[in-house]
Image (cartoon, rainbow, N blue to C red):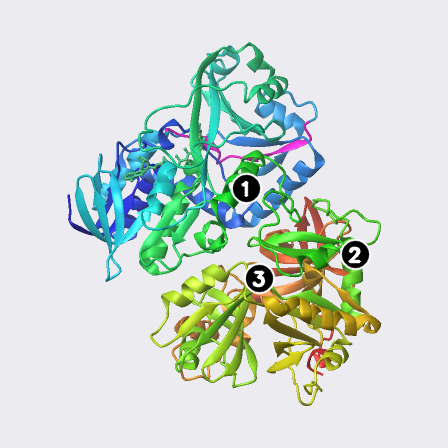
């Protein structure tokens, strides 16, 4: 065994093998994989081997497409068989809502280049004749769906990796991982010790135990899962071609041909977690005892959907555990605060996602960034608040919802509330309808008197409509108040803080008492963040950005930290409110002795002030695009600040507003949002954030060369706003934009402007087409809606009110 290596991958399941292969593919050959037993000895060996592209997250969907296309490449490189059966698959819809979801997916696929189709019941019957189509409204067909041989595929990855220089040590159990003073890792195994620059935890069923060796909590839980293989069935083996896959979400089942019979698996409601407190090291190539009682109701349902099953004998039952993260997506990437420690675990669909996970991780390790936004699987999407207490019920909820319709406005109920601010009971008493962001309860809207405190999950306009409209109009005509807890906030301190920020941020760093907006770029020029930088003193700055991305951003800051600078995440320590609307200044005047007149306290000023009883930091800026102020204080003082503002604002029409109203208000000004318009998928010039880049500053900020190249040659696409002629459904993101029947771009987000009474889409389209008045069509739930490009903001187009 080697004594030193660049990368040590722990775990030889399909995921570890894929990571190892991709590291060699991208040029690192001094890499090893340690497997405590044989390859595939965790979940991998007993998987059903199905693969599909369908995933609610568009980037995950694209990576699943990559994974599936990779298998042919692997077979060619290695000469080995992955046992591929590209038989295609359909996902049935038995309710209008499920059909809406499939239509929305199909629309996304149109600009992703995936050749999926919507089928009617007759086509379903023709295509998958064993299906009883009673009650079926339609289906989504994907020709890429299929299945493979899990063991053959894992060994093909391993062979391809070995061909690229990797070494694999079987029967070598990792027992300790100790970080050395120089940041490298000592990996202690039962066969000796290896020093590695990087380690990758691909421990699958044992990822929790492997993580714990380094003090890393991996939020995942194994669940028991069962599928049944039937005896031979003439209706199957007499067919001239292999039967396709059929996903029946209504029956929570997936079905495919296996040999001369069928194989059907279930995501049953009475599901069971496995080994909640840890995976025994002695567990190996073994199955769990059959538990047909657990899937009895699912089997009954399957008999009605596929009547052939009722007389099919059972050949084998496969019952085994595999791991899930709370949201069902993988846990990948560098662990914040642990140099050289990477995760590639929590992969619940190793044969749909393993290739994409391996590619992204290898890019991240070798290039320092991935080619696309991978936040959906980034470990940094979970903050320090996550614990097994949250993970366990959330994973069970996710397993049960595996085949449920996922609505764009849906708020999942389990493990709530988890994190709350001091305002929780106050807003709850005001009929708040709660949402959750990064574990934190945030108000979506306040239910009107007499209305249910629950937003109906829907692809179409929901029952939040009237309340949201009233909250929006309160802001535009009087004054609204909303919590600013859900901003990520950082305090940057040190004598070199300004110089450091000048290097990290692409924009201008403001003088004392001022704030500025700035993009933060990766070396490739892609967006890593968009921040408000407030200069509190020459050596002290506050940064505000996305709350959900706080760990992601903090990790980036720490990776680029210089001595003498401190960057503290104060997201949950500094909280407060924003007030916005024409009466906002009057309200602030009533609660502070500071001079807040427009001449003294100008747009983009920041000042410490006493507001009511408490010390605050007040910034003259508002994401509503209106005259507004963000007022920050400590969590301990938040209630006192609220009391002062609330009491003073009653005769000014003060009304609390939630995130639904916020998202409508920002559209009036075509303001983008993080992970919608602004994400690592896009560059500053594509999204218009280049207007905040300071090319004048004399600093070689990260991403400068790429940004300058874009300035010389503008990128091909550009972010624009459209007014959309839709009657009952809004844009959610990734809907295709067509011009003269050709897909030319896609939406990043959208919604309804209650102020202008218009449906708005934000979309990326070819730059040369981006002219006011361009006529286009946007597909919403299968309907082609007329869309007109607009360039004038719907509210305060000249910024007079915002700056006044
Ligand atoms: C019944 C069933 C059906 C399934 N069907 C499908 C399907 O149709 N399609 C699909 O995509 N997925 C399916 N899955 C899920 C799939 O099996 C997993 O997504 C996949 O196997 C995860 O692979 P992995 O490499 O992350 O983990 P694992 O397969 O668990 O591999 C982890 C490896 O790490 C090794 N290891 C752990 N700790 C150490 C240590 N300390 N030192 C050295 N080595 C260590 C283990 O021995 C093991 O080999 C199914 C799962 C089950 C249970």
Disc number for residue 394: 1
Q: Is residue 780 visible?
A: yes
Q: CA distance from mark 2 to mark 3?
A: 26 Å
- In which quadrant of the rendered image does the C terminus lie? bottom right
- Which quadrant of the structure image shows residue 157? top left
Mark found first going from the N terminus, 3 or 1: 1
* Secondary structure of residue under mark 2: helix
Q: Position of residue 515 (x, y in %)?
A: 56, 80
| Residue for point 47% across, 29% down | 224
Name which of mark 1 and mark 2 comes first in the sequence: 1
Of helix, strand and loop, which one carries label 1? helix
Is 140 included in the stretch rendered in magenta? yes
Residue at 37 percent of width and 51 percent of height = 361
Q: Is residue 435 magenta?
A: no
Label 2 crowd bin: few (<14), some (14–19), many (20+), radius 10 Å: some
Q: Quadrant of residue 591?
A: bottom right
Left or right relative to 64: residue 725: right
The tag earlier along the polypeptide, 2 or 3, is: 2
Please state which of residues 662 and 117 is positioned toward the viewer in this rendering. Answer: 662
Q: Quadrant of the N terminus?
A: top left
Confirm if mark 2 falls within 8 A of ligand 1. Answer: no
> Can you see residue 326?
no
Residue position for label 2? 467
What residue sits 47% from the left and 70% below the top? Answer: 520
Q: Residues within 10 Å of mark 1 (few under 14, many from 20)?
A: many
| Label annotation for residue 677 | 3
The residue segment tinted magenta is 136-149
40 w.r.t. 312: above or below: below
């Amino acid at each position: 065994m080697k004594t030193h290596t660049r990368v040590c991958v722990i775990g030889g399941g399909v995921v570890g093998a894929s990571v190892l292969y991709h590291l060699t593919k991208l040029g690192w050959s001094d890499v090893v994989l340690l497997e405590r037993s044989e390859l595939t000895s965790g979940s991998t060996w007993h998987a059903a081997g199905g693969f599909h592209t369908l995933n609610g997250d568009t980037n995950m969907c694209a990576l699943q497409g990559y994974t599936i296309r990779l298998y042919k490449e692997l077979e060619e490189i290695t000469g080995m068989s992955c046992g591929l059966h590209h038989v295609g698959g359909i996902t049935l819809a038995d309710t209008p809502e499920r059909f809406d979801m499939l239509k929305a997916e199909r629309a996304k696929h149109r600009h992703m280049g995936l050749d999926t189709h919507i089928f009617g019941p007759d086509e379903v019957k023709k295509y998958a004749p064993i299906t009883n189509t009673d009650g079926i409204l339609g289906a989504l067909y994907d020709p890429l769906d299929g299945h493979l041989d899990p063991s053959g595929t894992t060994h093909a990855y391993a062979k391809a990796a070995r061909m690229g220089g990797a070494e694999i040590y079987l029967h070598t159990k990792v027992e300790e991982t100790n970080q050395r003073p120089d940041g490298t890792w000592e990996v202690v195994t039962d066969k000796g010790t290896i020093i590695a620059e990087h380690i990758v935890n691909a421990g699958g069923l044992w990822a929790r135990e492997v993580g714990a060796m380094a003090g890393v909590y991996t939020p995942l839980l194994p669940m028991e899962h069962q599928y049944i293989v039937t005896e031979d069935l003439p209706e199957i083996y007499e067919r001239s071609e292999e039967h396709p896959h059929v996903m029946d979400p209504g029956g929570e089942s997936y079905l495919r041909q296996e040999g001369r019979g069928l194989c059907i698996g279930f995501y049953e409601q009475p599901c069971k977690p496995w080994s909640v407190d840890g995976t025994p090291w002695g567990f190996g190539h073994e199955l769990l005892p059959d538990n047909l009682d657990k899937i009895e109701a699912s089997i009954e349902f399957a008999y009605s959907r596929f009547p052939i099953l009722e007389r099919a004998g059972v050949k084998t039952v496969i019952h085994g555990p595999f791991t899930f993260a709370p949201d069902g997506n993988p846990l990948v990437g560098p662990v914040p605060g642990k140099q050289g420690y990477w995760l590639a675990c929590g992969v619940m669909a190793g044969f749909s996602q393993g290739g994409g996970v391996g590619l992204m991780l290898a890019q991240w390790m070798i290039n320092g960034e991935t080619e696309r936004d991978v936040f959906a699987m980034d470990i940094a999407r979970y903050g320090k608040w996550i614990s097994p207490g949250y993970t366990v019920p959330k994973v069970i909820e996710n397993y049960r919802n595996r085949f449920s319709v996922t609505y764009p406005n849906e708020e999942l109920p389990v493990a709530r509330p988890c994190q709350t601010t001091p305002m929780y009971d106050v807003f709850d008493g005001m009929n708040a309808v709660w949402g959750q962001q990064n574990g934190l309860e945030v108000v979506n809207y306040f239910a009107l008197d007499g209305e249910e405190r629950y937003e109906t999950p829907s692809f179409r306009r929901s029952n939040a409509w009237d309340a949201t409209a009233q909250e929006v109009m309160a802001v535009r005509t009087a004054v609204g108040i909303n919590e600013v807890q859900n901003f990520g906030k950082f305090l940057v301190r040190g004598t070199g803080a300004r110089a450091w920020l000048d290097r990290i941020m692409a924009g201008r760093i403001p003088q004392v008492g001022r704030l500025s907006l700035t993009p933060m770029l990766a070396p490739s020029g892609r967006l890593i963040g968009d921040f408000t930088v407030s200069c509190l003193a020459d050596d002290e700055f506050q940064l505000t950005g996305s709350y959900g991305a706080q760990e992601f951003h903090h990790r980036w800051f720490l990776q680029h930290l210089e001595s003498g600078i401190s960057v503290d995440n104060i997201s949950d320590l500094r909280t407060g409110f924003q007030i916005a609307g024409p009466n906002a200044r009057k309200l602030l005047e009533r609660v502070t002795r500071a001079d807040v007149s427009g001449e003294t306290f100008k747009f983009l000023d920041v000042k410490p002030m006493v507001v009511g009883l408490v010390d605050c930091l007040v910034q003259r800026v508002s994401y509503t695009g209106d005259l507004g102020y963000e007022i920050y204080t400590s969590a301990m003082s938040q209630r006192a600040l609220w009391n002062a503002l609330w009491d003073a604002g009653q005769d000014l029409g003060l009304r609390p507003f939630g995130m639904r109203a916020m998202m409508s208000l920002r559209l009036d000004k075509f303001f983008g949002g993080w992970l919608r318009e602004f994400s690592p998928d896009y560059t500053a010039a594509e999204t218009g954030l280049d207007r905040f880049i300071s090319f004048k500053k004399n600093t070689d900020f990260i991403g400068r060369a790429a940004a300058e190249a874009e300035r010389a040659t503008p990128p091909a696409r550009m972010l624009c706003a459209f007014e959309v002629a839709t009657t009952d459904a809004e844009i959610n993101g990734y809907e295709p934009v067509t011009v003269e029947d050709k897909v030319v771009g896609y939406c990043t987000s959208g919604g309804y402007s209650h102020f202008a009474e218009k449906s708005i889409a934000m979309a990326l389209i070819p730059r040369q087409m981006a002219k006011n008045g361009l006529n286009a069509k946007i597909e919403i739930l299968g309907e082609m809606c007329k869309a007109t490009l607009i360039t004038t903001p719907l509210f305060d187009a000249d910024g007079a009110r915002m700056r006044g």
